[in-house]
Image (cartoon, helix red, strand yellow):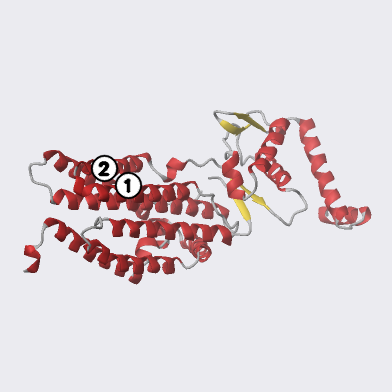
Amino acid sequence: MNGSFLVVDDTSESPPYRQIVEQIRAAIERGELQPEMPLSPVRQLAGDLGVAPNTVARAYAELQTEGWLVGDGRRGTRVASQIPRQDRHARARSLGESVDRFLASLQNRGFTKDEIDAALREAQT
Amino acid sequence: MALEHLTHDQLARVFTAAALVFLGVLQIAAPSCFWGMSMYFKGTRAAFSPEQRERLARVLTARERAEGNTDAYLRFVGILTIVMAPLALIPTVPFVLPYSLSCVGMAAAILISYLHFRRATERRVAPLVRRSVWASLPPLAVAATGVCLVGAGLFAAYPQFRAGVLTVIVAAIVLLAVAWRVATAPAILFGDDSQLEYLVDEHVRFSRATNLLSLVCAPPTVLVALAWATLPPTAHFFNVVMLTVAAAFVVVIAMSLNPIRKRIRLA
């Protein structure tokens, strides 16, 4: 066991399936999940996280569509052997989507664009 | 001595009743002997550094707190075991019935603690690795359990043992269902020290599931031993059955005790 765990936070604005997608993608990008590594079956992961199997199935389906995971009935769901990390466009798209979601979440909480810009600049210095 | 005038069946009943009272007293006085989570980490503790031992103690304390008052559950089972002991002395009751009920009671206590544990966690953390049910229920232990049950089933050839065989088979089905439930239960992690919590979860799951298998085997082995003692020495086939069931029981017990010695390794 090399420390790949998922956490679903009920208080987050992000829906559980989105949290699963982002955490699996991040674990692959960090190299914690290696190519061809088998993942938990849908039912097992849903039971561990206390979410509906459909939630996990939706997350796996999205990651398969994006090319992060591959699945076949017999061998279950695995990390893809060629992951999108090596694809510059996919990586940029993934970053753009994450930034959009992050900004939307802050704006939903009432922060203005200027406040967010200022906070980001301060964080980078 | 009064015991010299007892028949084999009466002796078996007296022995069973006395053993149940002893078991019940032990369950009340020292529930952690049957149950305590800490004892399954003796080997691990010895191999850990002081810092790792501290982490392990924190994880075990959190887990024990979340499982609720498990000692109280087992003390209740102990009281039931003692109360049921006189049942073994009634000639019309199969002598393995009270012991089988006691084993089912222990399994129910394990299941209740798991359900309590599941409700106690608010954060939902999950490992991303695939688990196999056979990692918690080793095929050799399952096969040996099957041998115990088939061995006990063979004694149904004698009409006087049929009720006893039926009792242990029914109890075994209930106990196997609980063992399967424990082996397939979700991993429950608090997220404070996920890696160690996961390793502890796997170790405890294996310990509890194999303990339950030994509970499945115990009533049939008692039935076979006491029933075999009443058979004439010419029943050679049943001598072999008795020895096979005893050997299978030893295998299951050895596997259920293995976690005490086995160490978990931190990456």
Depth check, front residue: A29 or B104: B104
- Kindly identify the amino acid type of the residue bearing the numbered disc 1: Ile
* Residue B45 position by quadrant: bottom left
Q: Chain of mark 1?
A: B
Where residue B14 sits: x, y (%)? 18, 63
**Disc 2 on helix, strand or loop?**
helix
Q: Chain of mark 2?
A: B
Task: Please indicate, yes or no, whether residue B128 appears anywhere in the rendered image.
Answer: no
Give the residue furthest to the front: B92
Q: Which residue is mark 2?
A: B153
- Residue A17 visible at all: yes
Instruction: Tell me the number on the disc at residue A85.
Output: none
* Residue hosting label 1: B169
Crowding near the residue tagged with mark 2, few <14, some 14–19, many ≥20 C-alpha atoms within 10 Å: some
**Closer-to-camera residue (B34/B50):** B34
Q: Which residue is at a point 22% across and 47% down the rendered structure image? A: B246
Relative to B27, is A23 above or below?
above
Q: Position of residue A77 (x, y in %)?
A: 60, 33
Decide: is A54 above or below B216.
Answer: above
- The answer to whether mark 2 and mark 1 are in CB contact below 8 A is yes
For badge 2, the amino acid type reads Gly
Label 1 crowd bin: few (<14), some (14–19), many (20+), radius 10 Å: many
Q: Quadrant of residue A12?
A: bottom right
Tell me the distance, in whole angstroms, between the alpha carbons under discs 2 and 1: 8 Å
Horizontally, is B182 left or right of A122 in the view?
Answer: left
